[in-house]
Image (spheres, helix red, strand yellow):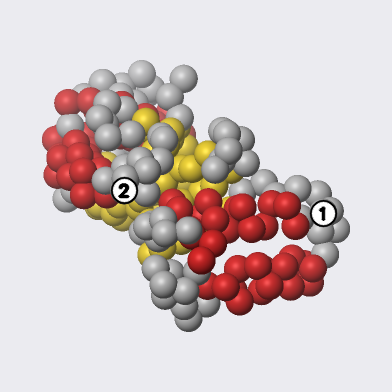
Amino acid sequence: VRLELTRRYTFNAAHRLHSPHLSAAENQRVYGKCNNPYGHGHNYVAEVTVTGPLDPATGMIAHLTELDHFVTHQVIEPFDHKNLNEDLPAFRDRVPTTENLCMEIFDRLKHFPGARLVRVRLEETGRNSFEYAGD
Amino acid sequence: MVLDLKELKELMEREVMDRMDHRSLNHEVPELGGQIPTCENVAALIWKLLAPKVRRGKLARVRLWESPDLFVDCYGDGGAL
């Protein structure tokens, strides 16, 4: 059999959806309320899925404390209670849509040494989410 | 229907609930064969118990939630247990 382990993490952050490639009117049309000048917040939920061989000694795919520590260090600490547009260099030139945020989180976690990262699923609200599994 | 839900419910009761519900996984589930009852091992056991018994259609996945922020998915590919 093949096993995948998924852990859910929460953080909250502010963002404003505004593209420098579009005019003010186009930004307003495309992003609507999400284009409001001072931004707005979300309570994000990131589901992180890893896989790998089951260690016969521990019966585990990955050490949860190691995964928690890595995710906290790579994602939660830099993102939680931050303004994604202002505080994250990754979003200087990219609009912090949840699509882009999901890819950024995947890239930050893909070198987790304890197991192979399969995918990141990011909930922006209870009604929408995005998944990224690398290429 | 892909599978009669009543059939699935009875299968789950017989193969999983009767063995595991209100039991000590360490002491009272001999099918674990002395394995540590991690979420991974229990998910794999549930797969092993159910997969051969699903006659209509086939078992696609077992998802075992250990807590609201942790679950394990078990799939049939990837080699023997």
Whether residue A114 is visible here, answered yes or no, is yes
Amino acid type shown at disc 2: Thr
Which dot marks residue B55?
1
Residue B8: x, y in percent?
A: 74, 65
In this picture, is B34 found above or below A17?
below
Who's the residue at 49% across and 60% down the image? B32
Asked whether the viewer can see residue A48, the reply is no
Circle on res. A58: 2
Q: Secondary structure at mark 1?
A: loop
Label 1, label 2: how far apart the Cα atoms are: 33 Å
Query: Which sits in the foreground, A117 or A19?
Result: A117
Q: The C terminus of chain B lies in which quarter of the figure?
A: top right
Residue B6 x, y percent position in the rendering: 79, 72
Query: Residue B56, how many percent across, how many down?
Result: 84, 53
Q: Chain of mark 1?
A: B
Is residue B7 placed above or below A10 in the rendered structure? Answer: below
